[in-house]
Protein backbone atom coordinates (compact mmCIF):
# COMPACT_ATOMS: atom_id res chain seq x y z
CA UNK A 1 0.00 0.00 0.00
CA UNK A 2 1.17 3.51 -0.69
CA UNK A 3 -0.19 4.45 2.76
CA UNK A 4 0.23 1.37 4.95
CA UNK A 5 -0.85 3.09 8.17
CA UNK A 6 -4.36 3.09 9.59
CA UNK A 7 -5.54 4.90 12.67
CA UNK A 8 -8.30 5.07 15.23
CA UNK A 9 -9.35 7.63 17.78
CA UNK A 10 -11.05 6.61 21.00
CA UNK A 11 -11.62 7.89 24.52
CA UNK A 12 -9.79 6.70 27.63
CA UNK A 13 -11.15 7.18 31.14
CA UNK A 14 -8.32 8.70 33.15
CA UNK A 15 -10.16 9.49 36.41
CA UNK A 16 -8.20 6.98 38.51
CA UNK A 17 -4.98 7.61 36.60
CA UNK A 18 -5.06 11.35 37.33
CA UNK A 19 -5.52 10.67 41.06
CA UNK A 20 -2.81 7.99 41.04
CA UNK A 21 -0.33 10.37 39.39
CA UNK A 22 -0.97 12.98 42.09
CA UNK A 23 -0.68 10.34 44.84
CA UNK A 24 2.66 9.17 43.40
CA UNK A 25 3.98 12.70 43.00
CA UNK A 26 4.60 12.40 39.25
CA UNK A 27 3.18 14.55 36.49
CA UNK A 28 0.11 13.24 34.75
CA UNK A 29 2.08 13.30 31.47
CA UNK A 30 4.71 10.96 32.95
CA UNK A 31 1.97 8.73 34.35
CA UNK A 32 0.01 8.24 31.15
CA UNK A 33 3.15 7.95 28.99
CA UNK A 34 4.38 5.22 31.37
CA UNK A 35 1.05 3.36 31.17
CA UNK A 36 1.09 3.73 27.38
CA UNK A 37 4.55 2.15 27.21
CA UNK A 38 3.47 -0.67 29.54
CA UNK A 39 0.55 -1.40 27.19
CA UNK A 40 2.71 -1.10 24.04
CA UNK A 41 5.23 -3.54 25.49
CA UNK A 42 2.46 -5.97 26.50
CA UNK A 43 1.10 -6.29 22.94
CA UNK A 44 3.60 -8.14 20.74
CA UNK A 45 2.36 -6.64 17.46
CA UNK A 46 3.29 -3.15 18.75
CA UNK A 47 6.91 -4.31 19.11
CA UNK A 48 7.30 -5.31 15.44
CA UNK A 49 9.21 -3.06 13.03
CA UNK A 50 10.14 -3.36 9.36
CA UNK A 51 13.83 -2.58 8.83
CA UNK A 52 15.37 -2.82 5.36
CA UNK A 53 12.55 -5.11 4.24
CA UNK A 54 12.78 -7.53 7.19
CA UNK A 55 10.44 -7.80 10.18
CA UNK A 56 12.00 -7.47 13.63
CA UNK A 57 10.46 -8.13 17.04
CA UNK A 58 11.99 -5.94 19.74
CA UNK A 59 12.14 -7.06 23.36
CA UNK A 60 11.30 -3.59 24.62
CA UNK A 61 9.91 -0.37 23.20
CA UNK A 62 10.84 3.14 24.37
CA UNK A 63 9.29 6.52 23.50
CA UNK A 64 10.17 9.46 21.34
CA UNK A 65 7.84 12.15 22.63
CA UNK A 66 7.52 15.66 21.28
CA UNK A 67 8.56 18.16 23.95
CA UNK A 68 7.65 21.82 23.72
CA UNK A 69 10.23 24.45 24.52
CA UNK A 70 9.64 27.83 26.15
CA UNK A 71 9.83 29.50 22.71
CA UNK A 72 6.91 27.26 21.57
CA UNK A 73 9.05 25.16 19.23
CA UNK A 74 9.41 21.48 19.95
CA UNK A 75 11.96 18.73 19.66
CA UNK A 76 11.81 14.97 19.50
CA UNK A 77 13.02 13.28 22.67
CA UNK A 78 14.17 9.78 23.53
CA UNK A 79 12.78 8.34 26.76
CA UNK A 80 14.00 4.91 27.75
CA UNK A 81 11.23 2.78 29.24
CA UNK A 82 11.61 1.64 32.84
CA UNK A 83 9.00 -0.53 34.57
CA UNK A 84 9.39 1.45 37.80
CA UNK A 85 7.53 4.71 37.32
CA UNK A 86 9.83 6.67 39.65
CA UNK A 87 12.88 5.58 37.60
CA UNK A 88 10.98 6.48 34.42
CA UNK A 89 10.08 9.88 35.87
CA UNK A 90 13.79 10.70 36.36
CA UNK A 91 14.50 9.78 32.73
CA UNK A 92 11.59 11.89 31.45
CA UNK A 93 12.53 14.94 33.54
CA UNK A 94 16.17 14.68 32.43
CA UNK A 95 15.14 14.41 28.78
CA UNK A 96 12.71 17.34 29.05
CA UNK A 97 15.51 19.46 30.49
CA UNK A 98 17.85 18.35 27.69
CA UNK A 99 15.31 19.25 24.99
CA UNK A 100 14.97 22.74 26.50
CA UNK A 101 18.63 23.42 25.64
CA UNK A 102 18.45 22.17 22.03
CA UNK A 103 17.08 23.53 18.77
CA UNK A 104 15.41 21.82 15.85
CA UNK A 105 13.23 18.74 15.64
CA UNK A 106 15.86 16.01 15.68
CA UNK A 107 17.98 16.40 18.80
CA UNK A 108 19.91 13.13 18.80
CA UNK A 109 20.17 9.69 17.21
CA UNK A 110 17.09 7.53 17.69
CA UNK A 111 16.96 3.73 17.93
CA UNK A 112 14.30 1.76 16.03
CA UNK A 113 12.68 0.30 19.16
CA UNK A 114 10.41 3.19 20.01
CA UNK A 115 6.98 4.67 19.49
CA UNK A 116 6.32 8.20 18.29
CA UNK A 117 4.35 9.92 21.02
CA UNK A 118 2.72 13.32 21.21
CA UNK A 119 0.27 15.21 23.37
CA UNK A 120 -2.04 18.00 22.30
CA UNK A 121 -3.36 19.14 25.69
CA UNK A 122 -5.05 22.15 24.08
CA UNK A 123 -7.41 20.19 21.81
CA UNK A 124 -10.17 17.68 22.49
CA UNK A 125 -9.75 16.08 19.06
CA UNK A 126 -12.08 13.45 17.66
CA UNK A 127 -9.87 12.56 14.72
CA UNK A 128 -6.16 12.87 14.03
CA UNK A 129 -3.63 12.38 11.24
CA UNK A 130 0.14 12.56 11.10
CA UNK A 131 2.52 14.27 8.70
CA UNK A 132 4.56 11.58 6.97
CA UNK A 133 7.18 11.33 4.28
CA UNK A 134 6.33 8.37 2.06
CA UNK A 135 9.96 8.21 0.89
CA UNK A 136 11.06 7.42 4.46
CA UNK A 137 10.66 3.78 5.47
CA UNK A 138 8.47 3.87 8.58
CA UNK A 139 6.65 1.21 10.56
CA UNK A 140 6.71 2.90 13.97
CA UNK A 141 3.36 3.29 15.80
CA UNK A 142 2.25 6.85 16.49
CA UNK A 143 0.22 7.53 19.63
CA UNK A 144 -1.22 10.93 20.53
CA UNK A 145 -3.31 12.13 23.46
CA UNK A 146 -5.62 15.15 23.45
CA UNK A 147 -6.98 17.51 26.07
CA UNK A 148 -8.22 16.05 29.35
CA UNK A 149 -11.90 16.75 29.77
CA UNK A 150 -13.77 16.73 33.09
CA UNK A 151 -17.50 15.97 33.16
CA UNK A 152 -20.01 17.50 35.56
CA UNK A 153 -19.75 14.29 37.61
CA UNK A 154 -15.94 14.49 37.88
CA UNK A 155 -15.12 11.80 35.31
CA UNK A 156 -11.86 12.64 33.50
CA UNK A 157 -11.39 11.48 29.92
CA UNK A 158 -8.88 12.02 27.13
CA UNK A 159 -9.04 11.11 23.49
CA UNK A 160 -6.22 9.00 22.14
CA UNK A 161 -5.20 8.49 18.54
CA UNK A 162 -3.34 5.33 17.54
CA UNK A 163 -1.77 5.01 14.07
CA UNK A 164 -0.08 1.74 13.14
CA UNK A 165 1.41 -0.01 10.12
CA UNK A 166 -1.28 -2.41 8.89
CA UNK A 167 1.35 -4.89 7.68
CA UNK A 168 2.27 -5.44 11.34
CA UNK A 169 -0.78 -4.51 13.40
CA UNK A 170 -4.44 -5.34 12.85
CA UNK A 171 -7.57 -3.92 14.43
CA UNK A 172 -7.56 -6.80 16.92
CA UNK A 173 -4.15 -5.70 18.21
CA UNK A 174 -5.22 -2.06 18.48
CA UNK A 175 -8.26 -3.22 20.45
CA UNK A 176 -6.00 -5.27 22.75
CA UNK A 177 -3.75 -2.23 23.24
CA UNK A 178 -6.67 0.07 24.09
CA UNK A 179 -8.15 -2.48 26.51
CA UNK A 180 -4.76 -3.02 28.18
CA UNK A 181 -4.16 0.73 28.45
CA UNK A 182 -7.59 1.29 30.00
CA UNK A 183 -6.95 -1.46 32.56
CA UNK A 184 -3.61 0.13 33.45
CA UNK A 185 -5.20 3.59 33.71
CA UNK A 186 -7.85 2.16 36.06
CA UNK A 187 -5.27 0.84 38.55
Image: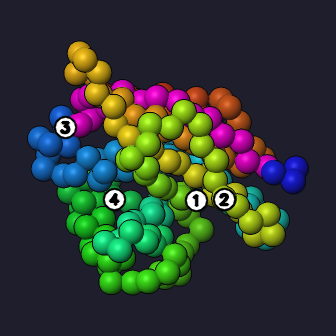
Which of the marked residues, 3 or 2, is nearer the chain's N terminus?
3
Q: CA distance from mark 4 to mark 3?
A: 18 Å
Foreground disc of the pair 2, 4: 2
**Marks 4 & 3, CB-CB < 8 Å contact:** no
- What secondary structure is the stretch in magenta mostly built from? strand
Query: Secondary structure under badge 3?
Result: helix
Q: Is residue 111 visible?
A: yes
- Residue 98 in percent (x, y) is at 32, 79
Q: What is the quadrant of residue 51 in the picture?
A: bottom right
Residue drawn at 23 percent across, 37 percent down? 18
Q: CA distance from mark 4 to mark 1?
A: 15 Å
Side (left or right) of 108 relative to 81: right
Residue pointed to by mark 3: 20
- Residue 62 in percent (x, y) is at 46, 61
Seen from this angle, which residue lies furthest right? 1
Residue drawn at 26 percent across, 35 percent down? 17
**Marks 2 & 4, CB-CB < 8 Å contact:** no
**Marks 3 & 2, CB-CB < 8 Å contact:** no
Query: Secondary structure under badge 2?
Result: loop
Residue pointed to by mark 1: 58
Which of the marked residues, 2 or 1, is nearer the chain's N terminus?
1
- Residue 168 in percent (x, y) is at 72, 47
Q: CA distance from mark 1 to mark 3?
A: 29 Å
Q: Is residue 144 above or below residue 90?
A: above
Foreground disc of the pair 2, 1: 2
Residue pointed to by mark 2: 131
Task: Look at the image and give the residue range highlighted in magenta.
Answer: 4-18
Q: Which mark is residue 82?
A: 4
**Marks 1 & 3, CB-CB < 8 Å contact:** no
Which of the marked residues, 4 or 3, is nearer the chain's N terminus?
3
- Residue 93 in percent (x, y) is at 25, 67
Q: CA distance from mark 2 to mark 4?
A: 29 Å
Amino acid sequence: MEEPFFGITTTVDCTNAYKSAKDLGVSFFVYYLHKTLLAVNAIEAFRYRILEGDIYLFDEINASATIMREDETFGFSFMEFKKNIKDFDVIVQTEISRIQTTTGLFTREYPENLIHFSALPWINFTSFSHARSFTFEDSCPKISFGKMMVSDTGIRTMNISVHVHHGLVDGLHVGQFVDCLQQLMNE
